[in-house]
Amino acid sequence: MSNTILNLREALKHSPDNAPLRLLLADALLTANKLVDAEIEYTILLTSASANKAKIGLANVFFKKGNYSACNVILEEAIEGGMEELAVFTLYAKALLKESNFGKAVEMYKRALTIDRNYFDEELDSQLRLRDTNAFEEEDMEIDDRFLQKPNVNFDSVGGMEAVKKEIEMKIIKPLQHPELYKAYGKKVGGGILLYGPPGCGKTYLAKATAGQVNAKFISVGLNNILDMWIGNSEKNLHEIFELARENAPCVLFIDEIDALGASRSDMKQSAGRHLINQFLQELDGINNNNEGVLILGATNTPWNLDPAFRRPGRFDRIVFVPPPDEQSREEILKLKLKDKPVEGVDYKSLAKKAEHFSGADIDAMIDIAIELKLESSFVDGIPKPINTNDLLNALKKHKPSTQEWFMTAKNFAMFANDAGLYDDILTYMKIKK
Ligand SMILES: Nc1ncnc2c1ncn2[C@@H]1O[C@H](COP(=O)(O)OP(=O)(O)O)[C@@H](O)[C@H]1O
Ligand SMILES: [Mg+2]
């Protein structure tokens, strides 16, 4: 018996109730393949504070013994009990594989990957990932009503941004409400609209508010809802999302961070990017399906990364620049955000002026900081005091605005890759062009 094990045993004699110590011993025994001894120690630990770890240990013992059904009973119970650990899912996937339960093994491997996207296990990977996708029909993610939202915000919840609201009104809301008028003038209704601009300036927020404004249903999907490591599944998920939107028209289908659609997926060891883009374009074109009453909104911080095929007529042929809030908008955002907070004599005007280059998200952050500072000072005497201009000014100085970095990059694209005036709005905003 190795020294480690002997030493641990010796130490345990003096403090038999030391669960972490016993766990070390049990793990050492497991590693040394002393399975009978390991089982004894883990079993003792089942009633201790280390019970969860003991369960995983026991499952490992049974796995090594080749007793996969006992291993699986333990893991199944652990998962039902709410244990969400990489070690649990991966061991379970392996044990299920031994019992040829592929469907469930896939499910567990997927759950492992949701905990750690980069987890990689040669055996699991080769046996599970590239298998015929049909074998896993019932394991597919369900695209269902959970994605449907009824937004509780509308344009009133968006501070300022009058120009953008107006643009959305003309390009999005009116066409949805009066399709016949647009058709009469030979103007196309449908296709998609792309919101772009620096981070934190309200693209996501505006998309939601737009749905609320027209009283339409709202489906918001991030790319993670669509991407699936199984070949062909991402395309299928995408199709189902569009179908859900069609069934629920009038409906705003919002796809956030749309540029990521074509992004490299090297971590997934498959080049599904192109297929996914093609599928997306097909859905957008509505070739096999009717997209009437479905408004497709996309948002991106990096429109220059978007596949140019996206911008052809009928696709994202209307693009809307969502700039940082101007002074007036910042004042309104401040008022909106402080509406339900205890404040006293706040000088919104001067704050808005000082918060140059602040995005909506920056204003959120600044208010958070002010509240924290205030909380700290009220701990001293236990009396909550209202937030005043000075508190907010202090917070403002502590927060660095986040929009300027974006403009440095954007400027280059706008100046040197400004296809058909695509980014004129950026140049106008930066006063580089009238
Ligand atoms: N005009 C605005 N009015 C009110 N809140 C805003 C506004 N712009 C941004 N915000 C706030 O900032 C947060 C981040 O905005 P978000 O829409 O996620 O930015 P983006 O999608 O452009 O990165 C929102 O949740 C919202 O609280
Ligand atoms: Mg966003």
Image (spheres, rainbow, N blue to C red):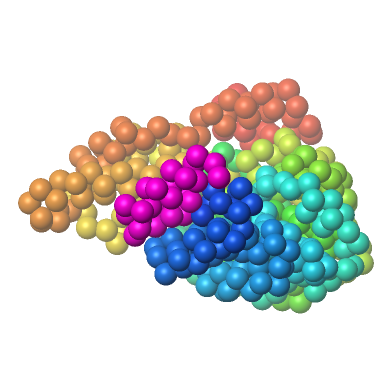
Residue shown at the point (53%, 69%) measured from the top left = 82
Q: Is residue 70 left or right of residue 376?
A: right
Q: Is residue 12 left or right of residue 185?
A: left
Using the image, determine if residue 385 lies above or below residue 422.
below
Q: Position of residue 285 (x, y in %)?
A: 86, 58
Q: Nearer the viewer, residue 243 or 309?
A: 243
The stretch of residues the image draws in magenta is 1-25
Count of residue discs: 0
Using the image, determine if residue 245 lies above or below residue 357.
below
Give the main secondary structure of the magenta stretch.
helix
Does residue 282 appear anywhere in the picture? yes
Residue shown at the point (68%, 47%) measured from the top left = 119
Residue 308 falls in image quadrant: top right
Q: Position of residue 8 (x, y in %)?
A: 43, 47
Residue shown at the point (7%, 51%) measured from the top left = 381
Q: Is residue 24 magenta?
A: yes
